Image (cartoon, grey):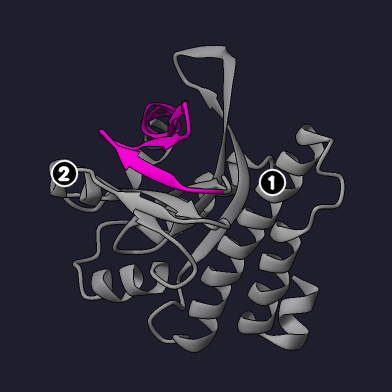
Amino acid sequence: MDYYKKYGKTKTIEIAYNMLKSSKHKEDKSFVSNVHGEICEVIACITIMDYMKHNPKQTKDWFYMKGLILKDLTNFNKFTEIDIVLYTPQMVYVIECKCYSGAKTLINECTIVRGNTEIDVYAQHKLHTQFLEEHIKYGRSTAENTLATQLVLFNFSVGTTQDIRSSKNRIFMINANHETLPKLFDFNKNLATVWDMNFLRKVNKILIGG
């Protein structure tokens, strides 16, 4: 974050890509996975911050949380963590960050296929979103059938990604990166207001123990 504030988004992303390509510690797969995951989350946050910086009027009520831990309201022994939640008057974006190197294909609702491995991102993320919706649902200012939350896969990684999902699934869980996430914000900026931002701020404060 400090590097971004000093040098800007473009140079920060260049450094991040170089870190992903580094062969240091490659024998420690767990360490590399954790570091790459954190890099992905930081770049997602920087993408949001940079958009807010350049669109101050549009984003004056926006705020986001990284690493939001939620309790299941039906089972108090069950917790989940959401990588990033971005709260806006038009939409709450629930963002899952993934950083897998190499050639990747997106199938079904949102399953990442990488070699012989399949990671069902949608199933995991849908559960996260349901947890969040239970906490914030009373902040809606419109009917329940209005789209109010958007699932997002933030995919910042080395290698290619081919999205062969249906049009419906591509919309239901957006595949985004540092270049396309701002375009999603632009596309949704003229949507009707759905959320009471004061309510969301109060709920978020409670969720983080404030």
Where residue 100 appears, x then y in whole percent? 57, 45
Image point 78% across, 58% down: which residue? 22
For the record, the magenta segment spans: 102-131
Query: Residue 139, relative to residue 31: is it above or below?
Result: below
Q: Is residue 72 magenta?
A: no
- Please, what secondary structure does the residue beneath circle 1 have? loop
**Placement of the N terminus among the 4 image quadrants:** bottom right
Q: Is residue 124 magenta?
A: yes
Q: Earlier in the sequence, mark 1 or mark 2?
A: 2
Viewer-proximal residue among 43 and 195: 43
**Side of 41 relative to 182 (left or right):** right
Residue placed under numbered mark 2 in the picture? 166
Q: Against 125, is 180 above or below?
A: below
Say whether residue 174 is visible: no
SS class, disc 2: loop
Pick the residue in front: 32 or 24. Answer: 24
Q: Which residue is mark 1?
A: 210
Horizontal and vertical percent position of residue 144 = 17, 41
Q: Amino acid at mark 1?
A: Gly
**Residue plotted at (18% across, 51% down):** 142
Instruction: Tell me what residue is drawn at x 25 percent, y 33 percent.
Output: 108
Mark 2 Cα-neighbour bin, 10 Å: few <14, some 14–19, many ≥20: few
Residue 18: image x %, image y %?
72, 67
Q: Taking 79 as reference, is 6 above or below it?
A: below
Residue positioned 52% across, 56% down in the render = 159
Give me the disc on residue 94.
none
Distance Cα–Cα, label 1 vs label 2: 41 Å
Which of pointers 1 and 2 indicates the residue nearer the eye? 2
